Image (spheres, rainbow, N blue to C red):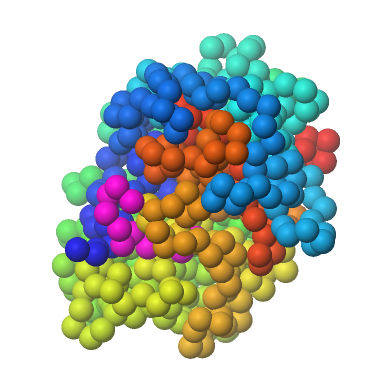
Amino acid sequence: MLTLKSLEGRKGPRHLRLDEVAARRLAGPGAGLCGLALLGAIAIAGCGAEEDGGDAKTDDTGTSDGGGGGGGGGEETTGDGGGTGDGTKTDAADGGAGVDAGVELPKETFWLLYGRRSRFPTGDENDLVLTDKTNPGALTNSGTYGIGINPLDHKGKALQITKYSFKKAGGLSCAFGCVMSQNFKYVAVADGQPSADGKGYTYKLGLVKPNLEVEVGKFGDLKNVADLHFAGDKLYYSQARNCFDTGKCQYEIRLRMMDGSAEEKLLTVMAPDNDPDVLASVKHTTYTGRFQVSEDGKTLVFLTTTIRSVKVWAWRDGNLYKLDYICEHPLDNETCVGDGSQYHDNDEVGISPDGLTVVLFTIVDRSLRVRRYQIASTTASVFSDIVTVPAGAAYKQSVCFSLADWQHAEIRSRPTFSADGTTVYFVGNSECTSEKEKPWTDILGLEVAKIGKPIGASDILNFTKNPRDNSTSNLWIRDLRLSPDKKYFVFNASPLWSTVADEPASGDRALKDTEAYVMPLQLGAKPVQVTNEVGYHVDRPEAMRPIEAN
């Protein structure tokens, strides 16, 4: 029977490192606090192996793997493979192409920073890896360059942050989580599992030198951190301050200037002290301290949830704005009734580059809905329904029967805006297949000005047009980011190519592995596979400006 499995039991945060360490099928509730999703930074954690750990120990060529690194057991070859995943070569083999011949590629230089996580329990510790975006060796010499290529000299394999940057950092590693600032100046390193009371991690803060070595001790430690974001020299973080019998808490949202230019300050408290969900004798809030930060570092967005509703808040320039109160069955402006909701405080929120427009995707009653808010403006919020199931039907049980070929059942990964703020990009996800088949995913785009009007097939831009089948060409896309100048998509997805040149990925790896990709932000462009390791997943690749550009 066709069902939307990813909407079943959605009780845990959506973009936490828990979701990177556990299988991204999201068929059930989260298993506890295990990490952060960051704007302007990247995170990885070591919460254990995912669901495929230890089951299939063979790579896509049928050779034994055993959880090793590099090519992960695949042959080291000298072929020039590359392409679309259907066995045909394309001009994408050099790692820099990705569009049809005659189409000029966007000019932009950037690096990729990604989480490298073992697929098998016997694999190495998790780490952050830094590679150039161009890596032809991923297909022609995966035994050496499957991990990526050194962005500093293009002569060796990619840099593993723990091994390269932490040599003088007192034995620190990214086993429990690392957060690197976009400007390569600061890093936060989790020094163990979250606290026993579940309030958060302890982070050691470090300074990243121009040679990428990390120096710790200058900034001290942060304890019981629920969420943490760098934005330039700013460090925003949340800490529990008032916890209830329900196990949920209010959180202080704090700002620290890493350059020492100002005293640390308390910005606000979430959920606010005067919120009815906090004032009620039985506390309704289920907020866990998550928030998002705009690229300019001036706007923060919070979703304070209950089991039935969500409030949308924005903080900017010292002012707190209540943008929305979303409830399917309200009794009044303060009371929401019902037996459950689809809302999470880490749901899919996008903030425009200028920090003034917020886009939020939610599932409300019978519809997948996109909302637009303007901060510090008299402009009213507006919304449009993208998918609606028939009257009387439950969304998650019936949506797979209601989808047109241009529609997806839900939105995954944080929405990201174009450079001019006119278009928002996101991942459409439809888990309408069996557990042994890939879900349907695509990179989609929508003009922000169209939110508030009826949305049809011609309004949704589809940049990948993945087939809705279980073939290698159907890239199962997990997370999406844009390059610094917003000319390329950067994402992780199931592999197109095996470690033997010219052979498409197949078998267990084609379903469960993830590799890094870049693709020009152009309709008709082709994805270029940048990494190629059988034994390791790529988690949340992030595009970074080269050090000399910061």
Q: Say above or below: 257 vs 98.
A: above
In the shown orientation, is residue 171 left or right of residue 412? Answer: right
Residue at the spot 50% in from the left edge and 47% down from the top edge: 493
Vertical placement of residue 529 versus 296, above or below: above
Quadrant of residue 404 in the image? bottom left
Taken as a whole, is the magenta stretch helix, strand or loop?
A: loop
Would residue 516 be found to the left or right of residue 268 on screen?
right
Q: Is residue 194 above or below residue 302?
A: above
Q: Viewer-proximal residue, 507 or 177?
A: 507
Which of these two is toward me, 314 or 10?
10
For the point 29% across and 39% down, the residue is 32
Which residues are drawn in magenta? Answer: 427-437
**What residue is shown at x 63% (from left), y 71% (from top)?**
423
| Residue 425 x, y percent position in the rendering | 58, 64
Image location (x, y in percent) of residue 31:
27, 40
Quadrant in which the C terminus is drawn = top right
Q: Nearer the viewer, residue 183 or 492?
A: 492
Residue at 82 percent across and 61 percent down: it is 102
Q: Position of residue 540 (x, y in %)?
A: 53, 43
**Considering depth in this image, is 78 or 183 the residue closer to the camera?**
78
Can see residue 342? Answer: yes
In the image, residue 477 lies in the stretch drawn in magenta: no
The quadrant of the rendering that contains the N terminus is bottom left
The correct choice, above or below, for 238 with respect to 309 in the image is: above
412 sits left or right of 484 in the view: left
In this view of the protein, can residue 248 be seen by the observer?
no
